[in-house]
């Protein structure tokens, strides 16, 4: 625009010498799609022009003074303030402002005039708060006066002393170091700061978000009460801990200009400023800013108009050197649209890059969601990008026309209603097709024919895609409209989450494929226990344990029993929500040692039989039903509930069948086909080891299988392994790109004030997912594919747990999860066997010592850590 004024849209970090660090960073963020309000930068040239008449007098005022001495700095500041009493904004600068201001705000809209000094917000020192910001300014005259005020703040006693203490020498302040930034003042619903590394406890490796009602000034200066949350730094969607406080005052806009303290509305005083999805979005913006700017950031943010606004980002200058680091992960975007999208690191790729075959299967899996949108009208789909050898995914809403989505969604609901009238489930509808396809793949027997193997592998992939598409199409999303849920709500008066949790405890506990699997493990345990040498092998599981069992004459009966078990459940891989299994993990049929690991807990003395545990849990379930019914004095409502309860139960049972035959078997049969193809390629000398097949793409595998004389892939595989090993040293960031500014609507406000439970306290709070109370020894386990070593009655404490671990749940005394969902396999299995469970117990894996004695209360949703002197 001019040498004196520049629009924020036009500035970048390379312009910091003329517009200052604050404006340069915000301009850079804005150019990358961050939601930064528009702005106007007064350059250092404007400052130099305004101060030119006073340069010699200012230099004289600070001459021979030691500004590190507060008294001498104060004397210098008083002298300079007297000189600058008549400081005016030069007319060329005023004219430039008149041209640029209409692009920032209307005449009566409040703006903030903020310092953006070239020595401010640096990587070593920030000088935060040393220079003036004038908020809530309206009209040209007030803005010009605010500009003069901010310029003069360059010579405040604190600013002079701070620069001297930082070793900047004795400067006269007229060296062109002072720029300003004018932006609309966001009338925030709530605002705060996000530290992408905990500045107080950096070893915690957490993101810290502070939030207050109203404008952010109250959070920055600590003048109002704030909520605080800690999120896992390399997984910003994981909330580790929250402290919600009562907030009675806020900083708001004063209609007469500036800011003022005012009372917080009563319904907001005990509510969280940030619902969890909003909190996670703030953390996402923090990490995205850190990635762009190259080191941990202190980000000021605000929420207004249903969206996030980024107001400032500066380096955290107080971190020890080993924590003042970020991810070395340069990205070159092929498309601008990708840069403007947030991409999440694939969970399986945190520790190592995926192989080519894993990438291919993952892409097909993502496609199943897109395929399902066309059929069902629900949800969105996953896009996937491979960046520096890691998979990143982004969820995008359906792009189908609204009418098409509505028609498809209603068709899904109609199908559910029609099937229910026929006393069938959605699984009954799809099961014949799926089971026929599964049987067809199981019947394949041409492992010596490469071309037929290629067809078989493609068929397994095709079944995988078809069946997972059906998986996504199996939800009618009736919610509270489900007749059983509706009848329960009418009978009890419960609503929302309370109704969901109470209702779930009444429908779980039916006989399912999972209960049959667990009974099979218990039967294997009894057989193994009857042969002492075999029992020792199953319990200790040395290397090559299954080979040893195959050689034992005394284990013949056990092997037959295992064969029958694997015939029914051999495709199990543990894939599913809460598990960290990958495509490389062998099925149970391929590696029966996994079944032995599941069997061992049932051999421990004192282990209750699964049948007994289910009977106990079912009796408690029926007692709950009777208590709810007895509490209602409307017999018609009770009768309606009793009518629909069995329907809800057989639908829940069908869901478990659906999850096994689709989620588990689709992966298991594909894994088996991959293994069979790998063995053929080894026999042909094309690859060295069976699992080397994972380093080839699906098309390359097909070509090799169909070739009469397949070429050696050893050199190509070695090259790809070396490339992956080189990338192993990279730490991939949890997200790339720019998060979405628009937020989902705020849920209803509620009392969320955190009870007195300081860090290090003895109570960990969460959500009760399975009723009951149990005292036991905590077994804290990391996220791993290995089966945790537990003994009967132990309390399993984990970040999450999924199908890979649920077969051992009947042996547990209790379950505690940092994360989890009320309707996931873990919670459902816990309820089926009467295992007290607490989910959403944030920080449990960090706060509960391994081996400590704890009391799990699955009704109250608490875990008490007992003191050592109580044991």
Image (cartoon, helix red, strand yellow):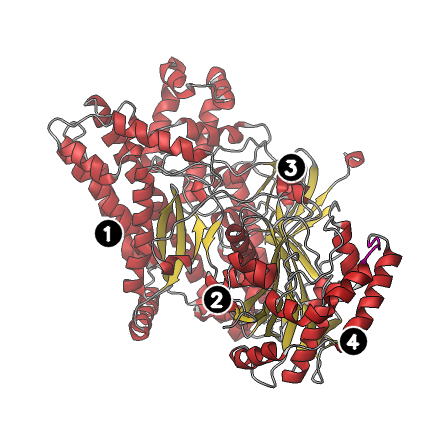
The answer to which of marks 4 and 2 sits earlier in the sequence is 2
Mark 4 neighbour density, 10 Å: few (under 14) some (14–19) many (20 or more): few
Q: Is residue 866 left or right of residue 346?
A: right
Does label 1 or label 4 sit earlier along the sequence? 4
Count the marks: how many?
A: 4
- Secondary element type, mark 4: helix
- Mark pair 1, 3: CA separation: 44 Å
Q: Is residue 588 visible?
A: no
Which of the two residues, 343 or 76, is positioned nearer the viewer here?
76
Provide the residue designation for mark 2.
10
Q: CA distance from mark 4 to mark 2?
A: 33 Å
The magenta stretch is: 63-67
Q: Residues within 10 Å of mark 2 (few under 14, many from 20)?
A: some
Q: Which residue is mark 4?
A: 85
Above or below, 172 against 854 in this view is: below
- Which residue is rendered at x = 36% and y = 23% of the image? 559
Label 3, label 4: how many angstroms apart (C-alpha)?
69 Å
Of labels 3 and 2, earlier in sequence is 2
Q: Does label 1 or label 3 sit earlier along the sequence? A: 1
Nearest to viewer (mark 3 / mark 4): 4
Residue 503 position within the rendered picture, expressed as x and y whole percent measured from the top left = 53, 61
Q: Marks 1/4: CA distance?
A: 86 Å
Q: Secondary structure at mark 2?
A: helix
The quarter holding residue 244 reads: bottom right
The residues bearing labels 2 and 1 have C-alpha atoms spaced at a distance of: 59 Å
Q: Name the mark nearer the viewer: 2 or 1.
A: 2
* Circle 4 or circle 2, nearest the eye: 4
Residue 508 rendering spot, x and y as whole percentages = 49, 53
**Numbered circle sitting on residue 433:** 1
Answer with mark 2 or mark 1, whichever residue precedes in sequence. Answer: 2
- Classify mark 1: helix, strand or loop: helix
User: Of residues 455 and 179, which is closer to you in this image?
Assistant: 179
């Amino acid at each position: 625009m001019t040498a004196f004024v520049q629009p924020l849209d036009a500035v970048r970090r390379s312009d910091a010498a003329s517009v200052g660090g604050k404006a340069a960073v915000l301009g850079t963020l804005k150019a990358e799609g961050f939601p930064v309000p528009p702005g106007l930068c007064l350059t250092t040239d404007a400052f130099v022009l305004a101060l030119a008449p006073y340069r010699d007098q200012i230099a004289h005022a600070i001459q021979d003074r030691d500004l590190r001495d507060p008294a001498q700095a104060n004397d210098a500041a008083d002298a300079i303030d007297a000189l600058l009493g008549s400081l005016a904004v030069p007319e060329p600068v005023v004219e430039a402002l008149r041209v640029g201001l209409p692009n920032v705000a209307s005449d009566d809209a409040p703006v903030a005039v903020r310092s953006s000094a070239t020595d401010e917000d640096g990587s070593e020192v920030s000088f935060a708060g040393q220079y003036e910001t004038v908020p809530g300014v309206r009209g040209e005259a007030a803005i010009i006066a605010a500009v003069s005020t901010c310029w003069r703040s360059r010579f405040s006693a604190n600013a002079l002393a701070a620069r001297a203490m930082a070793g900047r020498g004795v400067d006269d302040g007229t060296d062109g170091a002072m720029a300003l930034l004018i932006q609309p003042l966001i009338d925030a619903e709530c605002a705060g700061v996000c530290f992408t590394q905990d500045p107080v406890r950096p070893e915690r490796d957490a993101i810290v978000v502070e939030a207050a009602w109203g404008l952010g000034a109250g959070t920055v200066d600590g003048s109002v009460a704030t909520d605080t949350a800690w999120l896992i730094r390399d997984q910003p969607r994981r909330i580790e801990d929250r402290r919600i406080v009562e907030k009675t005052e806020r900083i708001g806009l004063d209609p007469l200009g500036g800011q003022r303290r005012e009372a917080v509305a009563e319904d907001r005083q005990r509510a969280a400023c940030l619902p969890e999805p909003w909190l996670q979005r703030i953390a996402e913006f923090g990490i995205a800013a850190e990635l762009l700017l190259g080191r941990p950031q202190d980000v000021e943010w605000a929420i207004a108009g249903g969206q996030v606004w980024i107001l400032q980002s500066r380096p955290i200058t107080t971190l020890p050197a080993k924590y003042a680091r970020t991810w070395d992960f340069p990205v070159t975007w092929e498309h601008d649209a990708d840069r403007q999208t947030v991409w999440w690191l694939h969970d399986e790729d945190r520790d190592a890059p995926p192989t080519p075959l894993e990438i291919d299967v993952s892409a097909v899996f993502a496609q199943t969601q897109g395929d399902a949108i066309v059929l069902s009208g629900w949800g969105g789909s996953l896009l996937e990008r491979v960046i520096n050898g890691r998979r990143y995914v982004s969820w995008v809403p359906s792009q189908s026309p609204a009418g098409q989505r509505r028609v498809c969604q209603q068709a899904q609901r109609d199908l559910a209603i029609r099937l229910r009238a026929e006393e069938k489930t959605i699984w009954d509808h799809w099961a014949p097709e799926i089971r026929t396809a599964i049987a067809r793949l199981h019947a394949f027997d041409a492992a010596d024919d490469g071309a037929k193997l290629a067809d078989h592998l493609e068929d397994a992939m095709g079944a995988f895609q078809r069946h997972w598409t059906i998986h996504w199409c199996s939800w009618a999303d009736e919610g509270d409209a489900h007749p059983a849920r509706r009848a329960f709500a009418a009978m009890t008066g419960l609503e929302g989450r309370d109704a969901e949790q109470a209702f779930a405890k009444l429908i779980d506990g039916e006989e399912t494929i999972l209960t049959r699997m667990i009974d099979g493990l218990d039967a294997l345990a009894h057989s193994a226990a009857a042969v002492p040498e075999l029992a020792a092998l199953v319990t200790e599981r040395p290397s090559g344990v299954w080979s040893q069992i195959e050689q034992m004459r005394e284990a013949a009966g056990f092997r037959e029993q295992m064969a029958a078990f694997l015939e029914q459940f051999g495709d199990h891989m543990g894939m599913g929500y809460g598990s960290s299994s990958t495509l490389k993990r062998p099925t149970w049929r391929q590696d029966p040692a996994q079944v032995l690991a599941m069997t061992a807990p049932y051999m421990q003395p004192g282990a209750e039989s699964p049948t007994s545990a289910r009977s106990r849990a079912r009796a408690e379930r029926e007692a709950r039903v009777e208590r709810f019914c007895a509490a209602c004095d409307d017999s018609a409502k009770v009768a309606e509930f009793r009518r629909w309860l069995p329907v809800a139960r057989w639908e829940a049972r069908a869901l478990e069948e659906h999850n096994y035959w689709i989620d588990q078997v689709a992966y298991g049969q594909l894994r088996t086909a991959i293994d069979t193809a790998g063995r053929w390629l080894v026999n042909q000398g094309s690859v060295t080891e069976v699992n080397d097949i994972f380093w080839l793409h699906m098309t390359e595998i097909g070509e090799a299988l169909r070739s009469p004389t397949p070429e050696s892939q050893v050199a190509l595989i070695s090259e790809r392994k070396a490339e992956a090993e080189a990338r192993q040293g990279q730490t991939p960031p949890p997200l790339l790109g720019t998060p979405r500014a628009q937020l989902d609507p705020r849920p209803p406000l509620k009392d969320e004030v955190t009870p007195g439970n300081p860090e290090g306290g003895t109570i960990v709070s969460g959500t009760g997912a399975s009723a009951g109370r149990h005292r036991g020894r905590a077994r804290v386990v990391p996220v791993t594919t290995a089966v945790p070593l537990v003994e009967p009655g132990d309390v399993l404490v984990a970040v999450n747990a999924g199908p890979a671990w649920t077969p051992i749940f009947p042996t547990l005394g209790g379950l505690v999860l940092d994360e989890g969902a009320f309707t996931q396999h873990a919670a459902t299995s816990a309820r089926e066997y009467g295992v007290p469970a607490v989910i959403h117990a944030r920080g449990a894996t960090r706060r509960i010592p391994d081996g400590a004695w704890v009391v799990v209360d699955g009704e109250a949703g608490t875990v008490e850590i007992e003191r050592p002197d109580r044991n």
